[in-house]
């Protein structure tokens, strides 16, 4: 239970096409992350799966059944929102139980479901409080608890960590991963943060301007990007894009990740001057200005001493470089 | 108290002086009405600005008001008309505002503009047509006629203000309700209305005063004794040749009280709404 199937799904707001034909299969129990820059349509796509936006054309199927015209409450889904969206006038307990109460479940069953969910998220001490008496992290845990209570076929997360501070974000990320293991439920998760996507997903769907740019496991996207968009979006710091012709390669662009560029004071293929150095302890990022390729980033592991204005030479690792044509598509050799 | 580093005594004093001056100017007419309502007729004309003293104190105006005409009934009529009209204005205004701000449909903007026209065109221009309508429907000399007119008069401003406020209510909250299976009506009444309560209070205050004080429509649509409102009832003391100033001032003083009570109720809502939103 919990397979999702999108076939040629499109969405237009008046003359503006927001989703331009998306085909996607999400298997039961899979953790699927939609990632992309703001305005790429990832949230709209999630809201279409939830039934909060109408589908202009194409089909949305949950467990094989077409749900294009099914209201959100009948789709057996649960959604966690970026702004928590807890009901301000209800206690945590009533917030969590509301959906079951609306569905007409017996009181004992609601109490049991709420107890089970609050146990998983250690929410018991908060059950009688109202949302205004909770911190941001607690509110998001309640929102996740509210989703769990419904035992949905699909969990939908709409940037659930964006309003939390950095430490809490890491903590809640781990919590969500643990819940996915325990519940074995299908989860669809929208984020613009590629670190969240890489750490949580079984499979990542990279969206760009209303189209799927690439679908794959995190390491597939990292090691085998299909185009410059995915290559640039996945990985941090961003991949360097060099002029292929200047290096005697075919195609338009040569992509190389900062960790696969070798830096040397003595010799190398690309000369440049250091413009900035970031010391992060575990790693060192060096930014180098070059005449032909512009600003390039080199990522070194551990601590390294480089000075600004030093002249250095860079050499791309030929086995880790990617070639792209003028349209940004990958050239596979 | 306020942060000392950011305020200085002269500046605070100047601000208070300006506000106090304005308060005195605004309240002065009310003050004159109330003190003169408690004086004898001779004292009203002799020394209109003097406070009532042992010799000049008199309740004759209030006695006249309570004996002549049926003022408790007039008060009741005014109160019914004002409260029912307010309820309708807030209910229908909020519903229309919710529809305009929440749903995408053909003619949405046009409907909003059409409703906004009502703010710019005074309803009194249509008095003749309204009277014909009321005569045709047999509603002349009923409180319901007044309620209908005042509801129509209040809705444009209510829609205009509330629609803007409702746009600020989080979409996520409404969508969470939809996923949990709440009907659109419950989303409206349980989630949206409590969050726009300060705006509702503002609309209520702005709509209430003109309704309570109106003389025009009661005079034209409901002049019969049994449906007279306070403002119309007070006119019996204003004669063509003799005016009973004691009674006029007394009835006006009495008419202030209910509005004051309603205002206090709404303004408390207003303040509570503002602070609860600010602290979040």
Image (cartoon, coloured by chain):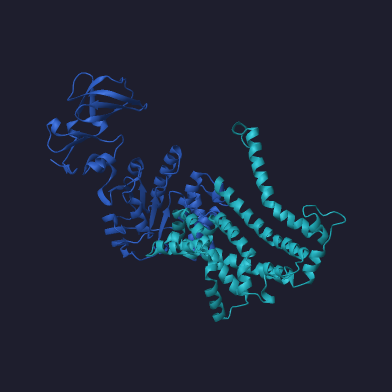
Q: Colour of chain B?
A: cyan
Quarter of the image where the N terminus of chain A is located:
bottom left
Placement of the C terminus of chain A among the 4 image quadrants: top left
Asked whether the viewer can see residue A109, the reply is no
- At horizontal 73% and vertical 62% (from top left) the residue drawn is B254
Specify the farthest residue to the front: B241
Q: Is residue B135 left or right of residue A62?
A: right
Relative to residue B11, is residue B33 drawn left or right? right
Residue under the point 77% across and 72% down: B68
The residue drawn where x is 66% and y is 56% is B264
Q: Residue A290's spot in the image, x, y percent?
A: 22, 26
Foreground: A296 or B29?
A: B29
Q: Nearer the viewer, residue A15 or B207?
A: B207
Q: State which quadrant residue B102 falls in.
A: bottom left
**Residue A327 visible somewhere in the drawing:** yes
Residue A29 in the image, given as x and y percentages of width and height: 34, 53
Q: Nearer the viewer, residue B151 or A24?
A: B151
> How many numbered marks, from 0 up?
0
Instruction: Out of A44 and B42, give the one closest to the viewer.
Output: B42
In x, y percent, where is residue A11?
30, 58
In the image, residue B168 above or below residue B6: below
Snapshot quadrant of residue A37:
top left
Give percent across and percent down for residue A139.
Answer: 50, 48
With respect to residue A222, does A300 lie above or below? above
Q: Colour of chain A?
A: blue
């Amino acid at each position: 239970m919990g397979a999702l199937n999108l076939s040629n799904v499109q969405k237009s707001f008046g003359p503006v096409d927001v989703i331009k034909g998306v085909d996607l299969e999400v298997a039961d129990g899979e953790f699927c992350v939609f990632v992309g820059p703001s305005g790429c349509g990832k949230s709209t796509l999630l809201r279409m799966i939830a039934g909060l936006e109408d589908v202009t054309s194409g089909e949305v199927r949950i467990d094989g059944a077409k749900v294009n015209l099914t209201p959100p409450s009948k789709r057996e889904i649960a959604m966690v929102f970026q702004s928590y969206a807890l009901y301000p006038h209800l206690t945590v307990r009533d917030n969590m139980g509301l959906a079951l109460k609306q569905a007409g479940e017996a009181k004992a069953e609601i109490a049991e479901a709420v107890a089970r969910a609050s146990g998983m998220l250690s929410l018991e001490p908060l059950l009688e409080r109202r949302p205004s008496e909770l911190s941001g992290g607690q509110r998001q845990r309640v929102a996740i608890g509210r989703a769990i209570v419904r035992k949905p076929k699909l969990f939908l997360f709409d940037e659930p960590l964006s309003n939390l501070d950095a430490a809490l974000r890491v903590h809640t990320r781990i919590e969500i991963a643990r819940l996915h293991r325990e519940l074995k439920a299908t989860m669809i998760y929208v984020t613009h943060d590629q670190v969240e996507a890489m750490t949580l997903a079984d499979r990542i769907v990279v969206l760009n301007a209303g189209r799927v740019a690439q679908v794959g496991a995190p390491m597939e996207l990292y090691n085998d990007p299909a185009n410059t968009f995915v290559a640039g979006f996945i990985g941090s710091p961003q991949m360097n894009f060099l002029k292929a012709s200047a290096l005697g390669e075919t195609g338009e662009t040569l992509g190389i990740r900062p960790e696969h560029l070798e830096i040397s004071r003595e010799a190398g293929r690309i000369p440049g001057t250091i413009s900035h150095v970031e010391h992060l302890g575990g790693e060192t990022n060096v930014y180098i200005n070059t005449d032909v390729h512009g600003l390039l980033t080199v990522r070194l592991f551990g601590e390294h001493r480089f000075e600004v204005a030093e002249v250095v030479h860079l050499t791309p690792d030929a086995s880790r470089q990617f070639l792209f044509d003028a349209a940004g598509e990958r050239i596979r050799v | 108290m306020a942060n000392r580093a950011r305020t200085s005594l002269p500046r605070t004093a100047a601000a208070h002086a300006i506000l106090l001056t304005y308060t005195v100017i605004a309240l002065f007419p009310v003050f004159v009405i109330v003190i003169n309502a408690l004086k004898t007729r001779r004292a009203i004309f002799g020394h209109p600005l003097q406070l009532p003293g042992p010799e000049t104190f008199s309740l004759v105006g209030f006695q006249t008001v309570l004996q002549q005409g049926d003022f408790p009934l007039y008060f009741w009529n005014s109160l019914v008309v004002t409260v029912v009209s307010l309820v309708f204005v807030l209910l229908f205004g909020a519903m229309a505002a919710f529809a305009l701000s929440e749903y995408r449909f053909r003619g949405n903007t046009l409907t909003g503009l059409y409703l906004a026209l009502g703010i710019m065109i005074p309803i009194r221009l249509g008095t003749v047509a309204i009277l014909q309508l009321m005569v045709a429907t047999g509603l002349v000399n009923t409180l319901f006629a007044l309620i209908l007119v005042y509801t129509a008069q209040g809705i444009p401003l209510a829609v205009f203000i509330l629609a803007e406020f409702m746009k600020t209510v989080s979409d996520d909250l409404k969508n969470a309700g939809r996923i949990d299976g709440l009907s659109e009506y419950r989303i409206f009444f349980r989630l949206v209305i409590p969050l726009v309560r300060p705006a509702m209070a503002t609309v209520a205050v702005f709509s209430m005063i003109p309704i309570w004080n109106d003389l025009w429509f009661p005079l034209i649509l409901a002049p019969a004794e049994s449906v007279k409102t306070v403002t119309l009832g007070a006119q019996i003391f204003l004669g063509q040749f003799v005016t009973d100033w004691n009674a006029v001032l007394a009835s006006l003083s009495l008419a202030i009280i209910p509005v004051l009570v309603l205002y206090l109720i709404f303004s408390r809502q207003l303040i509570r709404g503002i602070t609860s939103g600010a602290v979040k």
